[in-house]
Image (spheres, rainbow, N blue to C red):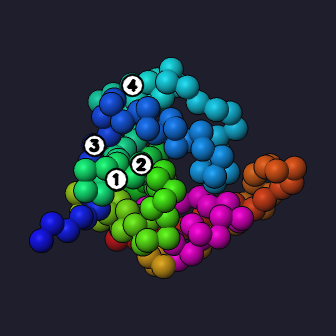
Amino acid sequence: MNKKKLELKKIKRKDLETVVKWRNNSEIMKYTTQFFLLNMEHQNNWFNDISKKDTDRIMFVFTYGKDIIGVGGLIHLDKQNKNADTAIMLGETKMHGKGLGTEALQLLVNYGFKKMKLHRISAEIFEYNKISLKLFEKLNFKREALLRDGLWKYGRWWDIYTYSILN
């Protein structure tokens, strides 16, 4: 039986066109801090930064079978204090609502705790992003902080919640 499974794979330069398409999708963009459309120059500069030896980010694509369906990683890595933030995006919107976001986040958490020996993984989530709030709570992330009116978007202020999970 040939069952598809979700996997983490190191992001490659050839993946960048797909990532730019996702990040410029208005349905995706509303949940990011991105305020302008990206082009391949932006994406190549980002890739060059994450490819440096001393980078504070490790990024992956999520593959499902042979297809890449998302991107994510551990960012703001603090090796001394063994913590990082997480970034996750399921770019293929037709794959939303199938439990793959839960699997993807679990893969990132497992990688951070088991491979990188992190102690704490956190995330910042906008108050209107109900799907992400539910996702992180489902995986036992705890809400630990509220940044009141931390984001100006869509003509109004929004709170930002900080969530974390400990190993």
Query: Which callout, 2 or 3, points at the residue further toward the start of the chain?
Result: 3
**Marks 1 and 4, how far apart in space?**
20 Å
- The count of marks equals 4
Residues packed near mark 1 inside 10 Å, few (<14), some (14 to 19) or many (20 plus) = many
Mark 2 vs 3: CB contact within 8 A: no
Q: Closer to the camera, 2 or 83? A: 2
Query: Which residue in the structure is indicated by mark 3?
Result: 10
- 163 vs 33, left or right, is left
Query: Alpha-carbon neighbours of circle 4 within 10 Å: few (<14), some, or many (≥20)?
Result: few
Amino acid type, callout 3? Lys
Q: Residues within 10 Å of mark 2 (few under 14, many from 20)?
A: many
Mark nearest the camera among 1 and 4 is 1
- x%, y% of residue 87? 48, 52
Q: Tell me what residue is drawn at x 67 percent, y 51 percent.
A: 30
Labels 2, 4: front one: 2
The part of the chain drawn in magenta is: 116-137
Q: Residue at x 75, y 54 (%)?
A: 150
Residue shown at the point (70%, 38%) measured from the top left:
35
Q: Nearer the viewer, residue 146 or 98?
A: 98
72 lies left or right of 53: right
> Do the residues bearing badges 1 and 4 touch, measured as CB atoms within 8 Å?
no
Q: Position of residue 61 (x, y in %)?
A: 35, 47
Task: Using the image, determine if residue 134 lies above or below residue 22.
Answer: below
Task: Give the quadrant of the C terminus.
Answer: bottom left
Q: Quadrant of the N terminus?
A: bottom left
- Judging by the rendered image, the residue that carries numbered circle 4 is 48
| Secondary element type, mark 1 | strand
Query: Of callouts 2 and 4, which one flags the residue occurring earlier in the amino acid sequence?
Result: 4
User: Which residue is under mark 2?
Assistant: 71
Q: Which mark is residue 24?
A: none
Does any portion of residue 118 appear in the rendered image?
A: no
